[in-house]
Amino acid sequence: MLMPAPDPAILSRRAELLARLREAVPDGVIEDENSRRAYEQDALTAYRQIPMLVVLPSSTQEVAAVLRICSALGVKVVPRGAGTSLSGGALPLADGVVLGLARLSKILDIDYDNRSVTCQPGVTNLAISKAVDARGFYYAPDPSSQIACTIGGNIAENSGGVHCLKYGLTTNNVLGVEIVTIEGDIVRIGGKHLDAEGYDLLGILTGSEGLLGVVTEVTVRILPKPETARALLIGFASNEEAGATVAAIIGAGIIPAGMEMMDKPAIHAAEAFVNVGYPLDVEALLIVELDGPPAEVDHLCAQVTELARTHGAVSCRMSSSEPERLAFWAGRKAAFPAVGRISPDYFCMDGTIPRKALPTVLARLKDFESEFGLRVANVFHAGDGNLHPLILFDSNQPGELERAEAFGAAILRLCVQVGGVLTGEHGVGVEKRDLMSEQFSEGDLAHQERLKCAFDPSGLLNPGKVFPVLHRCAELGRLHVHQGKLAFPEIPRF
Amino acid sequence: MTTLAPRNAAEVLDAVRWAMNAGEALEVVGTGTRRGVGRPVDAPHVLDVSALSGVLEYEPEELVLTALPGTPLAEIEALLASRKQCFAFEPPYFAARAGTLGGAVSTALSGPRRPKAGAVRDHVLGVTAVSGRGELFKAGGKVVKNVTGYDLPKLITGSYGTLAVMTELTIKVLPAQEDARTLIVSGQTASDAVRTMTSVLQSTADVSGACYLPEGVLLARDAPAPGAGAASATAFRLEGVGPSVEFRLSRLRQQLASSGSIAVLDLESSLHFWRGIRDVAPFADDATASLWRISVPPSRGAEALAALRAELPGARAFLDWGGGLIWLQLPGAADVSAALASEQQIRTVLAQSGGHATLIRASADVRRAVNVFQPQPAALAALSKRVKLQFDPKRVLNPGRMYADV
């Protein structure tokens, strides 16, 4: 993975930068190499780089001061929350500053009348739900890393989770943000009201992977917790039948709170790890969760059970207690570490496909396994088509890392070929950066970069992520000169 | 003045390039239903995209529909209904005309289900468009979950045609609700109504609509809301599968037993009632009266409403979104100076409550003079302008429609 070459001119100004940052954030600059090493990677552990400096501001004003300094000196900035990105979104740069937001960790306002929580970006996802739990509320998006990941990082990556089928991704649950631009301007967008005025800058900041601005405050909406939730554990003799059941459930007008699928290798890995009683003689397992008032959950559980039966389910268990429901989920939620136990290393892919393409894609994955000589286990957010193939490899074996990377690229190309996309919830980061041209033309990417130019014309915020080639805005800015005459007489005109 | 009527994306591209070279701006229109929303566009030419019409792909089980922007909204909604699906964001029909899909996305007006189901922008998955640079580009995708690259579909949604001309749209669709009931509490004051709506929205009643019609504000001149007479109506919509609706209705009835006299609308009356709220039916008759759409934090709805009424004699209003949306009608065909004065009053009230106001209907003279959209603080306005100039550097697409210099 090629990152932008360090700029010797910047490296030579490290002492000056250090002095100015210390002035701005007296107690929050990390200089010595061993302490900086703690920031060398995020959850995409295949890549690492020790940053030039790390700075940990503790207020919006300090963030603004840091960005003004970096902007003035032309120093690159990599924002970082808890470092749980699976796509390398927080991978540092040798000539860049890591701007860590972990110290901005206060919940500022809980407003039950407006069903909103306002907090700083370093608050963890789960801490928001915990803060409002006693009053019967929660924050809906629940990425698997929710115990550690921060709400600021969730905004940067537009994080999902197993319940986003019914309750939406981060972007659908954010009401407002305060950001600091690379020039150090503090800008507020949205608030406790719905739908910010003017262009939907909130919509584009969410999921912008730290390339447009640094989030310093967030207002999210909270929801009353559903009264009951029940999960169904349904086994199938084939992936096709499981896929057909998912289509039938959606076709019947049911949007479950969660609908997850695991293939045989994933079922076995998970069961061996958490031992919750998953059936081991099935090819595919569906977990369908229904939530709401008891009358609704009863009604829908009966409907889903019937649909599963008519589509060839070989087993079906309904959770009869809250501990049992959580046990059904425990295996799925532990799927990644479970796979980590049976393989020294794994890559987690994150493509989304039209659900109808699932049998084709799973069959092709079998071919790929022999082609690349590596095994794969699949977990699948079946409701929304978000596929997580886990490629198992051992980086100590010469050539396996490269083969795993090639395998991953082949899977993502396949996702695009069948009408899907490169990433459903983990982000592009560095991991899928060089595959962007599989999904987007040069012109498509140029329009995305133009947005970058509007926010960060000098390209200092998180460069090397998302875009295979980050053009200079001046170069990108040239207008094509088209023929001056009216060359299109065939357009009807009145 | 020339009207260009492209029949496909290639011709849209040609037309925009021609405008760029000629240095002459285009006003982009579909069937013109929402043409009166926003500032008047000072463009010598019209780009009529209504011929780009038709549904390209619709797969109910994928929850995705792809269509050309000029496709009549009513045609799409009928198609969705035939498969028991819908646009959950309830785009309004103006003066009983639905207009086009492109118009609904460009203006991004969401209906009463907004607090529960999300806004227009939450359902726009993918877009292909010609930017003001005379280049065709696509963004987003045709699947319901996607974080690949910037979410440009959200930027294009609600940009009133000022950044790009859409040539294809992919929208998330959802199952239509199997059953619905509406519970109406009559006779509440606005502040009691907002308190009641807040408590219902905090409960697990899971309502998909909560609105308040003050005394004398009726859905139609001759048809008071059933059960409400001419008294005020605080209304709650319950949607879902039959057993769930029945269960939640009976519990809500208990919760609100002491709040006032209660009536319940059946499925058909319920559909009619919320169509009326969606289309702002109480203020649809008088086309000369100005109409403002004001978004505030829901708990501030009643006090904002009271302040507006105190400052603007003759104003009529109702609340939607549990108090978070105020539809405000100002009497008569206001002259420009009166309109400027009322705008000032509205902005002053909003400075207290937070939120924003958009002038949805007024004469062209008024819309040219006042800030139709909420004025933005300097740093935010500068960002918006930079976005505009990146996508449309020569300002050939709907110049001035949102802000005079955008």
Image (cartoon, coloured by chain):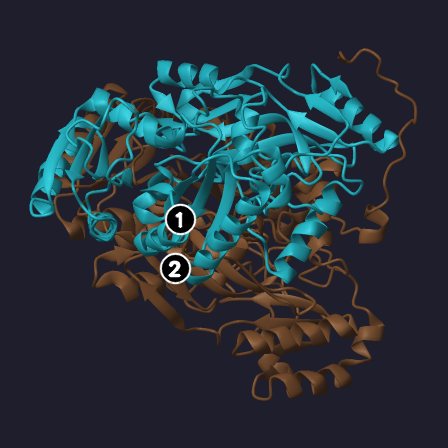
Chain colours: A brown, B cyan
Single out the residue that lies furthest toward the right: A484
The residue that mark 1 highlights is A161
User: Residue type at mark 2?
Assistant: Gln
Disc 1/disc 2 C-alpha distance (Å): 9 Å
Left/right of residue B181 with respect to residue A73 in the rendered view? left
The answer to whether any part of residue B62 appears in the image is: yes
The residue that mark 2 highlights is A146
Could you tell me which residue is drawn at 10 percent across and 47 percent down? B255
Secondary structure, mark 1, is: loop
The first of marks 1 and 2 along the sequence is: 2
Name the image quarter holding the C terminus of chain A.
top right
Q: Position of residue A395 (x, y in %)?
A: 58, 57
Q: Are marks 1 and 2 in contact (CB under 8 Å)?
A: yes
Q: In this view, does A381 lie above or below A138?
A: above
Secondary structure, mark 2, is: loop
Of B399 and A270, nearer the camera is B399
Could you tell me which residue is drawn at 46 percent across and 25 percent down? B94
Could you tell me which residue is drawn at 59 percent across and 47 percent down? B371
The chain ID associated with circle 1 is A
Residue A171's disc is none
Q: Where is residue A431 in the image (x, y as percent from the top left)?
A: 62, 51
